[in-house]
Amino acid sequence: MSAKKVAKESGGFTGEEKAAMKERAAELKREKKGKADGESDLLEKIAEMPDPDRTLAERIHEIVKANAPELASRTWYGMPAYAKDGKVVFFFQAADKFKARYATIGFNDTANLDEGAMWPISFALRELTPAVEKEIAALVKKAVS
């Protein structure tokens, strides 16, 4: 069954999903033209977020920069993301982006988190406590190890 037919039968993409795809297309165009400025683009997206997403994203950015400075800041589907060798390793998804009840942090398959036959790659995030910050820092460090 084609992707188009599946989307049509399931009611199609939501407005939020369509917006994210448009943002990704715009990111690719900027990258192709050499106009992408990863750090500035990421900070601009964070600044546009409503609280509490903005506060979470700002602190996540600080944690990533302190614990994995080799990761390049960028946006990915309009979300703050961090890449190594051009491939996204880690990302933050604001709760507001898809009208969810919590923000999400996630790791792509380029992250070195493999542990046994199964391991978590996505986490719900409602607040940052010192313990949560420590756990995120450890995961980010492991992801780029």
Image (tube, helix red, strand yellow):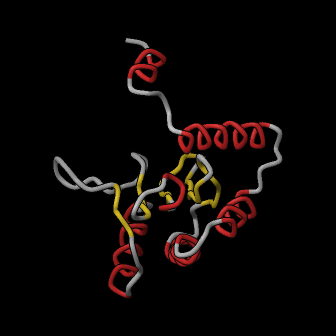
* 70 to 10, vertically: above or below: below
Count of marks overlaid on the render: 0
Percent x, y of residue 17: 53, 40
Which corner quadrant holds the C terminus? Answer: bottom left
Q: Nearer the viewer, residue 10 or 54?
A: 10
* 121 to 22, vertically: above or below: below
Residue at screen point 72% across, 59% down:
41
Residue at screen point 41% across, 57% down:
106
Can you name the residue that lies furthest to the top here? 1
Residue 129 lies in what quarter of the image? bottom left
Residue 121 lies in what quarter of the image? bottom left
Can you name the residue that lies furthest to the left here? 117
* 17 to 68, vertically: above or below: above
Can you name the residue that lies furthest to the bottom here? 130
* 6 to 88, vertically: above or below: above
Q: Nearer the viewer, residue 57 or 7?
A: 7
